C-alpha cells in the first residue's frame, strides 16, 4: 500500500511536470501540448512499474547518501568530542562523574525522542556509572524551540531532568506557553525566573552552539546518540565514539555502554 501511494504521488508529480513543461514550451500549440500530456499520462497509467522502478531508484539513492553521511559523522565525531562530551552548561542526568557518557540530540516534538525517554531513564537506573548529556536540538518549529528554551532555563535551577520528563510525558500536547509553565510549576520551578532565563543570552548562545555542532556532525534528524568513555579526548581514535542515528533499542544502547566501559 505504501508503494502504491508513492507511485500515485509520483504520477501526480510527473503529470505536474508535464503540464509545466508544456506551458513553458512556446513552440507547441495548445493541441500539441494537450497531446503530449495525454501520451505521457497514458503511458504511466499503462506501465506503473516504470514509476515504481523510478521510486525504488530514488529511495536507493537517498539511502546510499544517508549511509555516506552516517559514516562521515562516525568518522568525524572525534574532532568534536569537546563540544559533545565536555560542555559545562549541558544538562546532565545520571551520574555526573560516570565513566561512560551517552549524548542525545533530540527535539521535544519528535515522537521517536518521546519513546526514547523511558529507555534512557531505565538505562540510568540500571547503570550507576552512566552519565547522559542532553543536547537540545529544536528542529521542528516554534513549539520545539519554546520547550528547549524553557528546559535550558530549568537546568539553571537544577531541575532539568524532572522538567524534561514532564514535557516528554505530555506527548506534545502541552507544548504551549501555558502548558510548559504548568509543567514547570508541577516540578517546583520558579516560573518567573524561568521566563527571564529562557529568553536570556545564555540560552540563546547554547542553542546556537547546539545547532552549529549538529551541522558540523551532519545530523540527519532526531534522535541521534553518541556513546564514549567520559574522559575521551581529541587524540582518541574514531572507534572510541559510537554513533547511532535514530531510535534505538535499550539492549543496543546497553551493549555500546558495556563496550565503552
Image (spheres, rainbow, N blue to C red):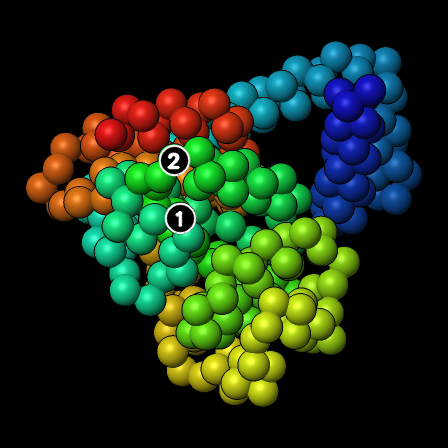
Q: Quadrant of the C terminus?
A: top left
Can you give x and y, in whole percent of width and height, for residue 102 in the image? Answer: 36, 42
Q: Is residue 111 left or right of residue 156?
A: right
Most foreground residue, 181 or 105: 181
Most foreground residue, 99 or 150: 99
Whether residue 176 appears in this view of the structure is: no
**Residue at the spot 53% in from the left edge and 27% down from the top edge:** 249
Can you give x and y, in whole percent of width and height, for residue 8 in the image? Answer: 82, 28
Whether residue 134 appears in this view of the structure is: yes
Sequence order check, earlier mark of 2 and 1: 1
Crowding at dot 2, Cα within 10 Å, few <14 / some 14-19 / many 20+, comes out as some
Q: Exactly how many numbered labels are in the figure?
A: 2
**Residue at the spot 46% in from the left edge and 39% down from the top edge:** 125
Crowding at dot 1, Cα within 10 Å, few <14 / some 14-19 / many 20+, comes out as many
Q: Is residue 125 above or below residue 249?
A: below
Q: Quadrant of the N terminus?
A: top right
**Residue at the spot 44% in from the left edge and 41% down from the top edge:** 124
Q: Quadrant of residue 35?
A: top right
Q: Are marks 2 and 1 in contact (CB under 8 Å)?
A: yes
Q: Is residue 208 left or right of residue 149?
A: left
Distance of mark 2 from mark 1, alpha carbons? Answer: 8 Å
Q: Is residue 207 above or below residue 54?
A: below
Q: Which mark is residue 127?
A: 2
User: What SS does tag 1 mark?
Assistant: strand
Can you give x and y, in whole percent of width and height, for residue 229 in the image? Answer: 23, 38
Residue beneath label 1, please? 94
Amino acid at each position: 500500500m505504501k508503494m502504491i501511494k508513492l507511485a500515485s504521488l509520483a504520477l501526480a508529480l510527473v503529470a505536474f511536470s508535464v503540464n509545466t513543461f508544456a506551458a513553458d514550451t512556446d513552440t507547441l500549440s495548445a493541441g500539441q501540448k494537450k497531446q503530449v500530456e495525454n501520451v505521457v499520462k497514458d503511458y504511466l497509467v499503462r506501465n506503473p512499474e516504470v514509476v515504481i522502478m523510478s521510486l525504488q531508484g530514488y529511495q536507493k539513492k537517498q539511502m546510499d547518501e544517508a549511509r555516506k553521511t552516517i559514516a562521515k559523522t562516525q568518522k568525524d565525531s572525534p574532532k568534536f568530542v569537546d563540544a559533545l562530551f565536555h560542555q559545562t552548561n549541558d544538562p546532565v542526568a545520571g551520574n555526573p562523574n560516570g565513566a561512560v557518557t551517552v549524548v542525545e540530540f533530540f527535539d521535544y516534538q519528535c515522537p521517536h525522542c518521546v519513546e526514547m525517554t523511558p529507555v534512557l531513564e531505565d538505562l540510568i537506573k540500571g547503570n550507576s556509572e552512566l552519565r547522559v548529556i542532553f543536547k537540545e536540538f529544536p528542529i521542528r518549529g516554534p513549539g520545539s524551540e519554546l520547550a528547549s528554551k524553557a528546559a535550558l532555563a530549568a537546568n539553571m535551577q537544577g531541575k532539568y531532568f524532572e522538567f524534561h520528563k514532564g514535557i516528554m510525558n505530555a506527548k506534545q500536547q502541552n507544548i504551549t506557553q501555558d502548558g510548559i509553565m504548568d509543567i514547570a510549576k508541577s516540578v517546583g520551578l520558579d516560573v518567573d525566573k524561568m521566563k527571564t532565563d529562557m529568553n536570556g543570552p545564555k540560552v540563546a548562545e547554547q542553542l546556537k552552539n547546539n545547532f552549529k555542532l549538529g551541522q558540523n556532525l551532519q545530523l540527519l534528524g532526531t534522535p541521534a546518540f553518541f556513546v564514549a568513555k567520559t574522559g575521551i579526548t581529541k587524540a582518541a581514535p574514531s572507534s572510541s565514539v559510537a554513533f547511532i542515528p535514530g531510535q534505538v533499542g535499550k539492549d543496543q544502547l546497553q551493549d555500546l555502554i558495556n563496550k565503552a566501559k
